[in-house]
Image (cartoon, helix red, strand yellow):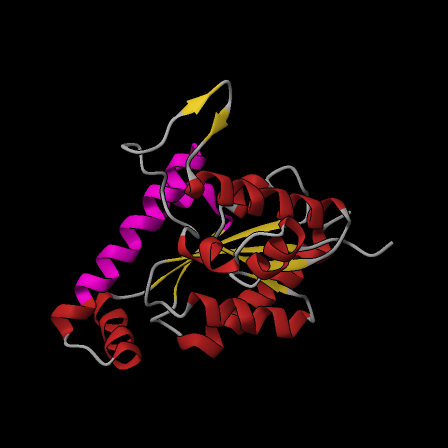
Amino acid sequence: MKKQIIIAVSREYGTSGHNIALALAKKFDFPLYNRNMLDEIASHKDVDVEKLHKYDERPRNLFISRTVRGMSNSPEEVIAEFQFDYLRAKAESGESFVVVGRCAEYILRDYPGLIKIFVLADKKDKLKLVQEKRGVSEKEAAAIMYRHDKKRKAYHNYHCPIKWGDSRGYDITINASRLGIEKTADYLESYVRMRMDALK
């Protein structure tokens, strides 16, 4: 029987974590789930995909939302649960895949083939990447990085008991500045293959 492997990649903004996840997906010929899962969810739920993207990986707004008898009126929380259910269904089907963010390292924690990765990088490298990608100044890039990471941290910490970026919540934490995108992906491929061999 084929071993199920789920590679959950969390990342700081500006680390090319998504590209590293994409490289891993290609190396193992696994599907990659990120924002793209929202299109399928929107089609299945018959909702506007733009609304799903608007609230994707965002923390719940405590000032305008409330929970009554376990039901939340927060669009951020509803969309998060849509994605969690989607990932649980994929995992339950036995499919192997790569997923970026979405608290997957916690949501799918009961699956023995789950491999949890956190990607960080040196600030100067993140600033350079954001400046080039967005065409902004260093000051603007720093503000963008801060804003994105603040939202990711709040989103993650709301849904997960272990704090975002805490090494105890991951199998491996890696600084992509040391090797670059391609070699970081190569290194992680080796780690994943060793984990695959160790699975009974």
Q: Is residue 29 above or below residue 83?
A: below
| Residue furthest out toward the left | 139
Provide the residue span drawn in magenta.
142-171
Q: Position of residue 69 (x, y in %)?
A: 50, 18
Q: Position of residue 145 (x, y in %)?
A: 25, 62
- At 46% across and 67% down in the image, what residue appears? 18
Q: Is residue 14 magenta?
A: no
Name the residue nearer the viewer: 6 or 46.
46
Q: Is residue 146 magenta?
A: yes
Q: Is residue 196 above or below residue 123?
A: above
- At 39% across and 35% down in the image, what residue appears? 158
Name the residue nearer the viewer: 35 or 199.
35
- At 23% across and 66% down in the image, what residue appears? 123
- At 48% across and 53% down in the image, what residue appears? 52
Q: Is residue 36 above or below residue 68?
A: below
Name the residue nearer the viewer: 43 or 167.
43
Label the magenta part by its dominant secondary structure.
helix
